[in-house]
Image: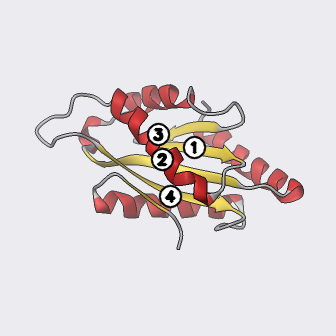
Amino acid sequence: MVDEQLFRFLIDLEVSKASRLQYCVSLVCVTPSNGVEHVDAAFAQRAAEAVSRHFRATDVVSTRAPAILLLLVAAETRDLPQIFRRTAAELEAHAPASGPGGRITWGAGGSCYPQTAMSGSELLGQATELTLEARRQRADTLILPA
């Protein structure tokens, strides 16, 4: 778990290393697609800490409430749907009791260097933009670049 400023630095660092050593780096941004009123910064922090225990030591987790950001070293685009499903299941287990709106659903956007993005800023921007699209769908879904 790192703060957002360090997370952004690590994105650029990992993309630079991946460019030299020729491996993939993926970024997944997971956020509630409905039930957002039940997810505050404290919940996002607790959930991110719980989720982080299920990732490798080389991966990095951060929050931008209500979103949880995952920087995944050596993960390709094809790996992201399974990673999202595991993450969403873990988030569901830690979700607060939902109110009249029902359970919280989780949407995510993902990107991968060099498969879909060519820089750290593009990696983050792509994942963030696709997360907004996932939220509009209001369902458990991961959206990847076409």
Q: Earlier in the sequence, mark 1 or mark 4?
A: 1
Q: Which residue is mark 4?
A: 128
Marks 1 & 4, CB-CB < 8 Å contact: no
Crowding around mark 2 (Cα neighbors within 10 Å: few <14, some 14 to 19, many 20+) is: many
Label 2: which secondary element: helix
**Mark 2–mark 4 distance (CA, rounded to whole Å):** 15 Å
x and y percentages locating residue 89 in the rendered image: 39, 37
What residue is pinned by disc 2? 84
Q: Nearer the viewer, mark 2 or mark 4?
A: 2
Does 4 sit left or right of 32 as displayed? Answer: right
Do residues under tags 3 and 1 come within 8 Å of each other at their CB atoms? yes
Tell which tag, 3 or 1, sits nearer the viewer: 3
In the image, residue 112 lies at what x, y percent?
Answer: 64, 60
Left of 34 or right of it: where is 66?
A: right
Q: Secondary structure at mark 3?
A: helix
Viewer can see residue 65: no
Q: Is residue 146 above or below residue 47?
A: below
- Going by the numbered disc 2, the residue's amino acid type is Phe
Classify the position of the N terminus by image quarter.
top right
Q: Who comes first in sequence, dot 3 or dot 4?
A: 3
Q: Nearer the viewer, mark 1 or mark 2?
A: 2
Give, as a three-letter code, the residue at label 1. Leu
Q: Amino acid at mark 4?
A: Thr
Determine the residue positioned at 42% across, 33% down: 90
Label 4: how many Cα within 10 Å (few below 14, some 14–19, many 20+) = many
Question: What residue would you read off at disc 3?
Answer: 87
In the image, residue 99 above or below residue 78:
above
